[in-house]
Amino acid sequence: MDWGMTNRLSRMIKQSTGRSVMLACDHGYFMGPTSRLENPRKTIEPLLPYADTLSVTRGVLRNGVDPGTDVPILLRVSGGASILKEDLSDESITTSMAEAVRLNAAAVALSIFVGSPHEKESLINLSRLVNEGQEAGMPVVAITAVGKELEKRDAKYLALACRLAAEIGVQVVKTYYCEDFGRVVNGTPVPLVVAGGPKLETEEDVFNLVHSAIADGAVGVDMGRNIWQNDHPVAMIKSIRAIVHENATVKEALQLFSEECRQRLKSSAEI
Ligand code: 5RP
């Protein structure tokens, strides 16, 4: 791998642990003002110090993120559909490689929709992005999107989608955690990170997901709603960091979460 590509990747996936906690705040590109991400700056600012990478579109980057930040940016460059459409797979590349370089992105991200009406277009878009990424020294992250069909998130489907992305030449794949996740990891010869999906019922459910994904071979998470839709987002991201970077158990993460919430409530009461 060329120096620029390797350097960009090593900013996102930490050399000390080989892992990464990415903060996903790119939902607005098709979901609009998602609950608790209505004002992206307000959501992102308190969480940014604990993120190894921030996933956003260029619009949120320019309008909601301090350019003085040293947190690497995973720039979402696909779009073109909204939640009003039944089929979310009709996406194109929305942001050029020159713009990604101008914004000093550490990597670019695009969704692929395997098995959906626009499967071919999304895979060809990915190929184009990888070709341009190779020229620019820009890593490409493929997101194995499932549109509205959340039930597609099983090992057979995700192993297929992740492998297709790896064969096209991406540097990282972002996918979902599922039962028998080891099958997805084994068939994907590049690092995998997992999304969180819609908000889970309890913090324990989230920590279980993160712990299992890491134990099964993911290098980290690119997680959004289960962090910033929680009433205690900073406590959430800090506890997730403990699992990802310090191999904390679910029980230890829950203890850390309670302690963080207690400290924060105490300091807000003192003000
Ligand atoms: C939106 C995305 C999100 O970045 C991804 O789904 C991660 O966020 P969440 O943890 O909320 O699912 O790709 O299209």
Image (cartoon, rainbow, N blue to C red):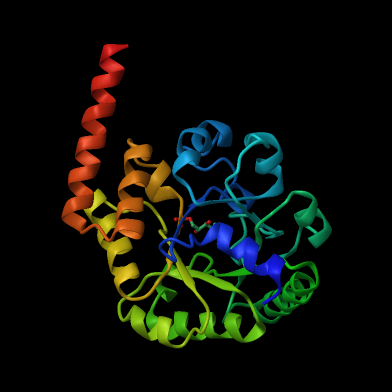
Is residue 170 found left or right of 137 in the rendered image? left
**Residue 44 screen position, x and y as percent:** 52, 38
User: In the image shown, does 251 or 49 lie closer to the viewer?
Assistant: 49
* Rendered residue at 61%/39% (across/down): 69
* Rendered residue at 64%/63% (across/down): 7
- Quadrant position of the N terminus in the picture: bottom right
* Picture layout, residue 216 above or below residue 80: below
**Residue 259 screen position, x and y as percent:** 20, 36
Q: Specify the quadrant of the image occupied by residue 63.
A: top right
User: In the image shown, does 106 or 181 lie closer to the viewer?
Assistant: 106
Regarding residue 5, the answer to whether it shows in the image is: yes
* Picture layout, residue 221 above or below residue 264: below
* Rendered residue at 70%/74% (across/down): 126
Q: Specify the quadrant of the image occupied by residue 138.
A: bottom right
Is residue 88 found left or right of 237 in the rendered image? right
**Residue 85 screen position, x and y as percent:** 62, 59
- Quadrant position of the C terminus in the picture: top left
Q: Specify the quadrant of the image occupied by residue 229.
A: top left
User: In the image shown, does 20 or 184 lie closer to the viewer?
Assistant: 20
Q: How many marks?
A: 0
* Picture layout, residue 152 above or below residue 43: below
Residue extending furthest toward the right: 98
* Rendered residue at 41%/74% (across/down): 153
Regarding residue 109, the answer to whether it shows in the image is: no
User: In the image shown, does 146 or 240 lie closer to the viewer?
Assistant: 240
Is residue 242 found left or right of 120 in the rendered image? left
**Residue 260 screen position, x and y as percent:** 26, 35
